[in-house]
Amino acid sequence: MNYKKDYSFPEGFLWSAATAAYQFEGAYLEDGKTMSIVDKNINPSFANTSVASDHYHRFKEDVALMKELGLKAYRFSISWPRVLPKGRGEVNQKGLQFYQNLVAELKANGIEPLATIYHFDLPACLQEEYGGWSSRQIIDDFAYFCKVLFEHLGNQVKYWFTINEQSNMFLLPYLMEFDDQIPIEKQKYEMNHIMTLAHAKAITLCREMLPDAKIGPAIGLSPNYPESCRPEDIQAAREADDFRNYLFTDLYVHGRYRENIWRYMKERGITPTIDEGDMELLKSAKPDFLGINYYQSRVVKYASESTIVRDMKVNADGRKGETEFEVVPGVYEGCNNPYLEKTDWDWEIDAIGLRTLLNELNDRYRLPIIITENGMGAVDKLTADGKVHDDYRIDYLAKHLEQCHLAIGDGVQLFGYCPWSFMDLVSTTSGFRKRYGFVYINRTDDNLKDLRRIRKESFYWYQGVIRTNEGVGG
Ligand code: BG6
């Protein structure tokens, strides 16, 4: 249903933008920082994380640009191996100081810090020592990392995100490391359980140490549409939603496994190990809000048990039509949506899907929601006039904001919006070839140039959105 147009957002809405440490900071082995698993495993055909956008050395200049943009809040992540180079134990004072300085600079400029504790960058030493997320040892190490952050940043940071896109770690192989000897699906469900326990411990600790803070996950979600009205396809879409979305949100909010997924795991002998007290811990750690990373919707159809599983091919170069869809035999397989435009990376552009998703989450959980990521990856061109004319990005964001506005009218308690990304940064799949920012970084994958910051057209557009507090922009 559509309603009369009025684009103003609620008073105090958190107009924000997002980045993540390994994609943005650079200085990946500086001042005591050690390697993370993403530093090691990022696609070698593109820029690595060694310099990235050089934010580590230019954070004051970057915060000044945030201020000029008008941001009310800024979502960033904290690098675990920068703060704890050995994954635990002695705190790296220089690493911690960087985040204390960043937070102080944000506060001095009236920008609310939104801190993500874990955004894919597990210290590589913990992976080597005990297999990272495959071992329960990580729960205590993660809790210790949280404790250090709450102790040293908790007086300034009010909003915390525990784990970024636990859901996507299922889909994207470069975000985790696996043991060749154990079936991969079994490892994934085991890791998922361990990660949810770590998330729950972080919430419990936050409640004890920072009773006034707000904390929740940042989840990557896509609504799944049926390819046809064939009942098998309708059921396949429901199940795809359960597997890729509600498995995680039900665990976070209700502390329970969905029965159909538990049954799927049981029939295949891949249920995670549940120790005494696990489910009680999960139940007791209800988040204050849901953070949602939304980029696209998906279409699925029923897949019989004999459907061949192809390797999920990621379209890294940005050549349309190269993505291979996901297949879960006996449940669903992905397929094309003929009704939607796609980015060069085959990501379907579906602003209405965001409203659908927000309403669904509101119906199920009745929690406040913040959009922690939403944006359009594209090859941006710096033209001869020294400008970047990214009207396609403005169009993408404006359409999504319109749907956010409608969702608020539907009753969704949406309190903030963090487009991905504040500035260009290393795309996880495609380096600097694929850009998302409001600010262009003058570098390519192979040439660091001068790393100059150049405001794109979308920068001025978003500035207008924030100034007027309206989704259509200035
Ligand atoms: C999200 C991640 O999955 O999507 C970000 O939280 C990532 O870290 C973003 O950069 C866009 O993905 P990509 O592969 O285009 O960089």
Image (cartoon, rainbow, N blue to C red):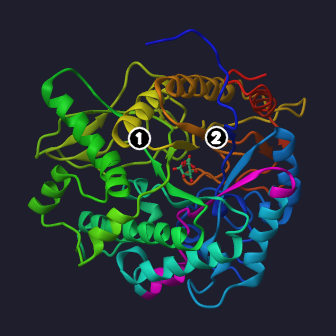
In the picture shown, does residue 445 fall above or below 189? above
**Image quarter (top left, top right, bottom left or bottom right) of the C terminus:** top right
Q: Is residue 122 one of those drawn in magenta?
A: yes
Q: Is residue 260 one of those drawn in magenta?
A: no
* In-front residue for pair 54/318: 54
Residue 74: x %, y % from top left = 71, 50
**Image quarter (top left, top right, bottom left or bottom right) of the N terminus:** top left
Residue 435: x %, y % from top left = 67, 43
Residue 29 tag number: none
* In-front residue for pair 64/53: 64
The kind of secondary structure element at disc 1 is loop
Which residue ends up furthest to the top in the rendered image? 4
Mark 2 sits on what residue?
419
At a point 66% along the width and 78% down the height, the residue shown is: 83
* In-front residue for pair 15/331: 15
Q: 10 Å neighbourhood of mark 1: few (<14), some, or many (≥20)?
A: some
At a point 40% along the width and 74% down the height, the residue shown is: 133
Mark 1 sits on what residue?
366
Residue 116: x %, y % from top left = 59, 60
In the picture shown, does residue 347 fall above or below 122? above
In the picture shown, does residue 212 fall above or below 391? below
Residue 415: x %, y % from top left = 59, 39
The kind of secondary structure element at disc 2 is loop
Q: Give the CA distance from mark 2 to mark 1.
A: 23 Å
At a point 12% along the width and 62% down the height, the residue shown is: 266
Q: Quadrant of residue 160?
A: bottom right
In this rendering, does residue 75 appear at all? yes
Magenta residues span 107-129
